[in-house]
Image (cartoon, rainbow, N blue to C red):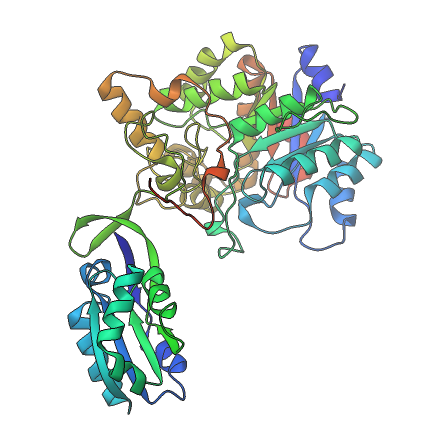
Amino acid sequence: MSQLQRELSQHRFVVTTEIAPPKGVDLSAALAKARALQGITAVNVTDNQGGNMRLSPLVLAARLLEAGVEPILQLTCRDRNRLALQADLLGAAALGVENVLLLSGDHMRFGDHPQAKAVFDLDSVQLLQAVSHLNLGRDMADRKLQGVPSFFAGAAVSPGAEPFELMFQKYRKKVEGGARFFQTQAIFAEDKLRRFMDAARPLGIPVLLGVLLLKNAATARFLNANIPGVQVPPELVERLEQAADPLAAGVAIARQQVALAREICQGVHLMSLGQEELIPAMLT
Amino acid sequence: MIISQQKNREELLQNLEGKKRLFLVGCGACATACKSGGEEQVFQLQEWLASVGREVTGSVIIDEACHIMRAARDLRHHRDAVAEADALVVLACGAGVQSISSNTDKRVIAGLDSLFLGNIRRLGQYEEKCSLCGACILNETAGICPVTTCAKGLLNGPCGGMEEGHCEADREVECAWHSIYERLKKQGRQGVFARTVPPKNWGKLRKPGRLKLG
């Protein structure tokens, strides 16, 4: 059982963060960054995030394990058909990776290879089902596996998306598909988060609140314009704008969100945008 | 209808290199409606070819250029003009081009790019609604195809990129799943939201497609 699964089952407040594989073959910076992390249960390894090509997350995840850092392997439907997804999953299990986060994946239109053919052979719900199936020792064609993986599968959710009911139907399908934990998209609207948690709580699946460090007002505006599903409310942009030390203000906002998560969620997923050294400050 | 548009003249000119005499083919169906390969466009092409020093030996608009036998018959009617030509320039979709190329040993130059199977909003405004995947789930999605109109072709609801009912890949476009949700709500039924849709059987998309009735 992974540390992440153990801590969540023990109802401990869990902290995850994420690290992107390099664009290239030199893993030293990514590994150094991961080793320096403190107070973290597991680290997401992103998969061609934003449709930008990088080294295979499977390789970095395996190297993190060797370095004593527990990974959460992200896998997107965007880049692989059902054969490739299952093949990579089996490969991950053979290397000792247990935590996976299954995503449909950002559209590649805004990434660095916009001319590539998008795959989306499966969607995230179907991929969750496929992983549940692998855990039972069968592939999607119902063929028996030699050696059975034991994945702890997670999924993503955007608690702020409207219409709420439409978003929540998908959330429910992911739970039924076998999601054992969720990490949320960054959400800054407390009322929307509370509404989501009120509806999600009866389903009993741990939710890690996505907390994104707003470095300054420009970052907030960039997120609003370019990152699907992320909305920084105007009053927060204003607060960052007025702050003498915007970064400190951003950390303070993150800290408030962590406090809110301690109240109503089961953990946080920190997105520090390259400022890993500020993670302890975000958690206190 | 198959939506097509003309290749730019520069690209066409490269393909015409070394070809002095040309026979022109248009299509009376889709390419006429798209104003990419109707009578008017064939005439304009002829004028342009003259301006770049080419000779046009003749031309024909085939009723439906994708009709292989009809294309054969129409080419036979213009046997002499075709024989005089170094190549045929075809203003029809890819299917039309291949009807022609299967009926002549001459070089066939495609003048159009075929874009998609399109619905007509009004003349000159076309939208892709169906991608001919071979396995409709339209009965569960209130007649809106997510395979085509969702940028990711998702089958179980919107992705996390939906914002206020708009698509992650193009904010101008309504999220297909939002449209499906709204229409099902109006109809008072759950439709596709009542179950998890299993992975799609892409095996039903026979490639190359063939259908023989009776």
Look at the picture and state if A273 lies above or below A206: below
> Horizontal placement of A270 versus A162: left or right?
right
Residue at image point 29% right, 31% down: B179
Residue at image point 75% right, 21% down: A3
Give the total number of marks visible in the rendering: 0
Q: Say whether residue A101 is visible.
A: yes
> Horizontal placement of B212 versus B25: left or right?
right
Look at the picture and state if A101 lies above or below A110: above
- Counting from the top left corner in percent of width and height, residue A180 is at 61, 18
Of A221 and B54, which appears nearest the observer?
Answer: B54
- Counting from the top left corner in percent of width and height, residue A179 is at 58, 20
Look at the picture and state if B124 lies above or below B40: above
Can you tell which quarter of the image residue B3 is in?
bottom left
Residue lying furthest bottom: B53
Residue lying furthest front: B214
Q: In which quarter of the image is the C terminus of chain A?
A: top right
Of A262 and B47, which appears nearest the observer?
Answer: B47
Q: Say whether residue A260 is visible.
A: no
Of B172 and B191, which appears nearest the observer?
Answer: B191
Residue lying furthest top: A202
- Counting from the top left corner in percent of width and height, residue A270 is at 61, 31
Q: Quadrant of the N terminus of chain A?
A: top right
